[in-house]
Image (cartoon, helix red, strand yellow):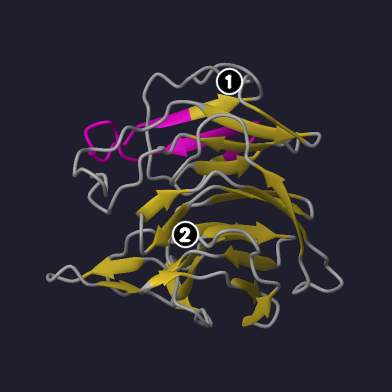
């Protein structure tokens, strides 16, 4: 339902897909962020409107937590980035404001979660002087099921390897967190860089986090570099990278998988 959207997020919660936020672009170039949250009923094949986001958002860091909550961190809201953390409770179909994100407010960041520990990296900041600037940042959030809106944030500083914009993020069965692809060259919805109007160059590399450490050495580069992702989708022992934009700023239907520490295949 509703118009087509860019930069929406989707998560799986209680065995069903939830779609939230995103933005649409009018003919004159005006961008409008959305507040919609919708659940797809796999039994009936129909969409259901859920409680809307308090703050319209797109290009946010989004994870499902404890098969009950959706955590929405920062992102772009109509005219700029926000530091808001919005928490959805599926038990009563309601939203609450959680502890704000203390890092640089960004859009196009990527978040992954294992248990009650969430790691968010990077994103693009908007400044009056420099325009759209990629930020290398990593933050750990400790979530408390007894007080869901109270989040303990700790800065992990800059992670190894390049900063990533619109990377795919996910969690393996072993509990390690993964970020794949994206780009170090911020671009608009058309895949063209903000600074020179040329196609952005996607990354083929992968970043992981386990046992309190980041690593860029566990997986070789994917043969086909892609950007403009939201998530690495878990499927058994594998994590799947689906679609994205290629080096010509064209959408691709390619699907790739990562298995443990083996090469993508």
**x and y percent of residue 75 in the render?**
48, 64
**x and y percent of residue 227 in the render?**
38, 39
Relative to 1, say whether 61 is above or below.
above
Left or right: 43 as drawn, with respect to 154: left
Quarter of the rendering containing residue 128: bottom left
Q: Is residue 154 visible?
A: yes
Looking at the image, which residue is at 19% across and 44% down?
197
Disc 2 versus disc 1: distance between alpha carbons?
26 Å
Q: Is residue 15 visible?
A: no
Relative to 67, say whether 217 is above or below.
above
Left or right: 188 as drawn, with respect to 36: left
Q: Residue furthest front?
A: 129
**x and y percent of residue 59 in the render?**
44, 59
> Which secondary structure, mark 2?
strand
Residue labelled with disc 2: 9
Looking at the image, which residue is at 40% across and 60% down?
126
> Which secondary structure, mark 1?
loop
Foreground residue, 137 or 128? 128
Looking at the image, which residue is at 38% across and 45% down?
228
**Number of numbered markers:** 2
Sooner in the amino-acid sequence: mark 2 or mark 1: 2
Residue labelled with disc 1: 219
Relative to 141, say whether 249 is above or below.
above
Badge 1: residue crowd in 10 Å (few <14, some 14–19, many ≥20): some
Foreground residue, 197 or 61? 197
Looking at the image, which residue is at 87% across and 72% down?
146
Residue range corresponding to the magenta coloring: 234-256
């Amino acid at each position: 339902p509703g118009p087509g959207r860019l930069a929406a997020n989707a998560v799986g919660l209680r065995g069903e897909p939830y779609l939230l936020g995103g933005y649409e672009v009018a003919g004159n170039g005006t961008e409008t962020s959305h507040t919609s949250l919708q659940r797809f009923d796999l039994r009936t094949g129909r969409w259901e409107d859920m409680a809307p986001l308090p703050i319209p958002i797109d290009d946010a860091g989004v994870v499902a937590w404890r098969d009950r909550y959706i955590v929405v961190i920062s992102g772009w809201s109509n005219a700029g980035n926000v530091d808001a953390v919005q928490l959805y409770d599926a038990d009563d179909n309601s939203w609450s404001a959680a502890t704000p994100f203390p890092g640089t407010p960004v859009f196009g960041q990527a978040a992954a979660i294992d248990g009650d520990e969430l790691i968010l990296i990077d994103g693009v900041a908007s400044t009056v002087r420099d325009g759209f600037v990629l930020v290398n940042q990593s933050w750990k959030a400790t979530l408390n099921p007894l007080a869901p809106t109270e989040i303990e944030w700790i800065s992990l500083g800059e992670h190894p390897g390049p900063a990533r914009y619109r990377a795919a993020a996910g969690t393996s069965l072993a509990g390690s967190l993964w970020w794949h692809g994206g780009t170090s060259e911020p671009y608009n919805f058309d895949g063209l860089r903000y600074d020179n109007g040329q196609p952005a160059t996607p990354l083929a590399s992968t970043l992981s986090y386990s046992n309190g450490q980041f690593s860029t050495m566990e997986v070789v580069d994917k043969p086909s570099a892609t950007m403009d992702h939201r998530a690495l989708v878990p499927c058994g022992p594998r994590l799947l990278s689906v679609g994205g934009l290629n080096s010509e700023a064209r959408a691709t239907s390619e699907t790739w998988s990562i298995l443990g520490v083996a090469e993508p295949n």
